[in-house]
Image (cartoon, rainbow, N blue to C red):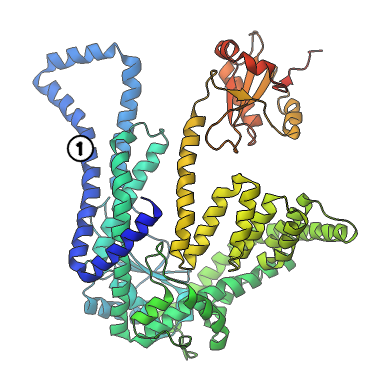
Amino acid sequence: MKYDQYISLIRRLETSAAADRKRYEFKVLLLTALGYGYFVGLILLLIAPIVLAIGGIVLVPARFFGALFNLVKFVWILVPALGVYFAFLGSAVSAITAKVPDPEGIEVSKSDAPELYAFVKNTCKELKARKPKKILVFDGFNAAVVSLPRFGIFGRKVVLMVGIPLMKALSPKQFEAVLAHEIGHISDKHGVFAKWAYQMREAWGRLIASQELVEHKLNGLYQTFVDRFFPYFTAYSFVLMREHEKQADREAARLCGNISLGESLILLETKGRQLDDVFWRSVHEENISKDAPAKQLFTRMLGFLAATDPESLRPSLEKAIAVPTDFNDTHPSLAERLRLIGYWDDGDLPRLPDEPTADAASAFLGHIEVKLIEQYDAAWDAEAAGKWKERYDHFQEAQRRINALEEKEGSADLTFEELKEFIGLTVDKDGLAAAMPLVEEAARKFPNEASAWFNLGIGKLSMGDESGLAQLAKAVELDKTFKYEADQAAFDYLRSKGKLDEAGKYAAALEEQNDLYQKANIERANILSSDEFIIHDLPAEFIESIPRKLSGIDEVEALYAVRKVCFFMPEFPFHVLLVELRKKRSGDLAPQRVLEIVTRRLDTGEINWFGLLTADWQRNATEIFHLPGAKIYSRPPQA
């Protein structure tokens, strides 16, 4: 399904869901049942031959074994076919019966956190929701309910997950609103639908992934169905999941008040942004300047989240409230959610929460809070210690190289490669904003380098500057190989700004590019001696490295490199390397083994296809031997 069709379908379905949600839910459940039905039907179809074989053995054994004897004559076909058949059947059964592991976290008991359990119990009763089987505390800035099957796709086990960092950032009332929202997802049909839909998608995903390992030999049994079914199922389920998010917000606002819920939504967005932009940035700077990490990193993060200066959150709120609802996220935007619950009416910036007198972690975890924090402190400190020194050494080396480049720049112009290196080191160490003057300098000094304009365009879009679109267009004008990445970046940027119609232009270009990629891949999938070839354009450094890399492989007489003439996407060269072997001697490796060794040693990205120079090539592709520079290696004479 193309982008414009998908967006149009989503908008149409949103209207349908708003008009009659019950009817819409029924349609989605029918689609889910269809997905399961096809999957189960596929398994039954595969089991049918086994059932027929058993029936033949029981009912007509003489005829069955006679037919089996005749089939044995074709054993070279039968054995591989049976291998593929049983592998597919096994992967299909495994995909639908696979055990889903519990999420990671530390389980807290009712005696450990009685207030938390009491609130969850009362809220579940109020919302007619199934009580969670267990409550897990973890170290993330989030909260969630997870519905898991007990066996394969059957049964239902609900797990509530609460993050200590989130609890530290919220007051008890704000945290209760978050819990009420999450429990809303397991009320009535929310959790049932989510579990069935999720498991159906996962089962199909596991089956398709398993078939990639055997090159999709039996994908004809399901590919057409998957291609037609899943775009519609994704659209239908997406709209319903977003409706569920809105309904969960309404229920949480009804139970806990729109003020508590609105404040929690604001703090989730603003403190989440500050966590990335301020706290982790400060840890990064410590890693640059100190060769060992400070202890209790987790506690430090909790302290950062607990500290509340409402005015410090204002810049983050201004950014968050400007983000539109995205068709890639089932959650509505912050602005839409605040409007929905009546916390904000599109006037001035939404009111920032007041400084709380207590945090939810202290209120709901009580005496076990300290123990849990100590556990995560130990785990975080151990993980940091394992990486810190290596990263410190990396940054010190980067700074030495930056100093050398700065010194050279003061006396002479840097080459384009040196300037690119300077930019990369600066981004890695100090961030994109610090590197932007260098990125702009590269485009100014090297206007004919497509990558300079591409980097400038990406940098500007990353910083919210729409003029980066023009720089991306300039890069594509200079080098078409940047087109796909440039169009993808432009599409992502415009979609993130809610400019869906403008994004559609780039989506259409990406779809066209994807079609071209598929045709180009098919064109490049089979290499024949009857194909047309031209002179290669391999880098001299690669060719010069071959004698060293093939040292000791005496079976190789010569190597020939050419470029296949491709109709689709010719801007991406496709290089073919043919290995000529010397006349067979005692002790020589098998030809296929020699090819494997050559491929492993020379497969550094320049060559797209490796093959043996067989009699077929020598007979049908004689022009290869006459192309200038085709012979890129000859075995050195023996002493």
**In the image, what residue occupies the spot 53% across and 24% down?**
527
The percent position of residue 273, horizontal first and vertical second, equals 54, 73
Say above or below: 604 vs 197: above
Could you tell whether 257 is left or right of 445 in the image? left
The percent position of residue 284, horizontal first and vertical second, equals 66, 67
**In the image, what residue occupies the spot 76% across and 61% down?**
441
User: In the current view of this chain or complex, which residue is farthest to the right?
Assistant: 411
Q: Nearer the viewer, residue 171 or 362?
A: 171
Q: Quadrant of residue 290?
A: bottom right
**Disc 1: CA contacts within 10 A as few (<14), some (14-19) or many (>=20):** few
Quadrant showing the C terminus:
top right
Can residue 24 be seen in this snapshot? Answer: yes
Q: Nearer the viewer, residue 153 or 312?
A: 312
Say above or below: 378 vs 444: below
The percent position of residue 538, horizontal first and vertical second, equals 69, 32
Q: Quadrant of residue 555?
A: top right
Residue to which mark 1 is pinned? 44
Secondary element at tag 1: helix
Could you tell whether 103 is left or right of 200 in the image? right
Tell me the amino acid under the disc marked 1: Leu
